[in-house]
């Protein structure tokens, strides 16, 4: 299973946490079990934040790498805001951020309907930079189809 195929926070955590835990363990600061537990928690919170924000943006069908990138950005901004505004330690700010995501995730699961995958996929296709209306609705058919063969 690769990270792009993951559809939930738990699946993405199982894919992303072990390599990050090994890198953390290789630093020599912690044991392997502690590194695995720490990275599993961090990855789960980051990916959960990403999937929550994707659901709020009506883009819940996006893959796990999109949730990872969005979650990293949101977690960094959220933790910075908590540390700067309330002068919390980073560990305490992470706990507050985790509890906030837990509460928001619980509320959002109850209030939002299931995502409509087909329409969201079409919307992102048409808003992408590579979209060219002339490719879908050409004014003239292909040149080979216009001319009759010369005989």
Image: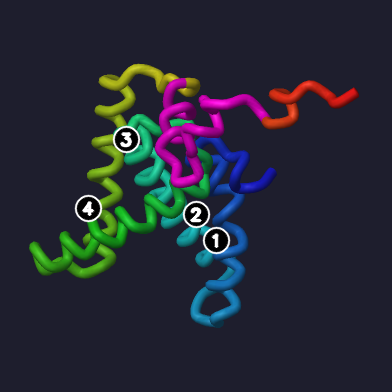
Q: Residue furthest bottom?
A: 28
Q: Which residue is mark 1?
A: 36
Q: Nearer the viewer, mark 2 or mark 3?
A: 3
Q: Are marks 4 and 1 in contact (CB under 8 Å)?
A: no
Q: Are marks 4 and 3 in contact (CB under 8 Å)?
A: no
- In three-dimensional space, the C-alpha distance between marks 4 and 1, rounded to whole angstroms, equals 21 Å
Callout 1 secondary element: helix
Q: Please report the residue visible at 69 percent of the width from the left and 31 percent of the height from the top.
A: 143
Q: Range of the magenta residues?
A: 119-142
> Do the residues under discs 1 and 2 have CB atoms within 8 angstroms?
yes
Q: Which mark is residue 96?
A: 4
Q: Do labels 2 and 3 touch, CB within 8 Å?
A: no
Whole-percent x and y of residue 34?
51, 65
Q: Look at mark 2 in the image and give the residue it sits on.
A: 40
Q: Vertically, is 148 above or below 14?
A: above
Position of 11 with respect to 70 (left or right) is right
Residue corresponding to mark 3: 57
**Location of residue 55 (image quadrant):** top left
Closer to us: 18 or 5: 5
Residue 138 part of the magenta segment: yes
Residue 67 located within the stretch drawn in magenta: no
Instruction: Say which label, 2 or 3, has the lower sequence index.
Output: 2
């Amino acid at each position: 299973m690769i990270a792009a195929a993951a559809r939930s926070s738990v699946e993405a955590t199982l894919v992303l946490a072990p390599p990050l835990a090994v890198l953390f363990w290789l630093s020599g600061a912690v044991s392997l079990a502690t590194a695995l537990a720490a990275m599993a928690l961090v990855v789960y919170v980051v990916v959960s934040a990403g999937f929550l924000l994707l659901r709020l943006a009506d883009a819940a069908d996006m893959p796990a790498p999109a949730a990872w990138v969005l979650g990293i950005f949101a977690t960094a901004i959220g933790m910075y805001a908590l540390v700067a505004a309330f002068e919390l330690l980073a560990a305490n700010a992470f706990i507050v951020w985790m509890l906030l995501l837990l509460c928001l995730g619980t509320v959002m699961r109850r209030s939002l309907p299931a995502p409509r995958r087909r329409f969201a996929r079409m919307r992102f296709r048409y808003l992408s930079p590579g979209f060219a209306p002339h490719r879908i609705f050409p004014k003239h058919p292909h040149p080979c189809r216009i001319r009759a063969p010369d005989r």
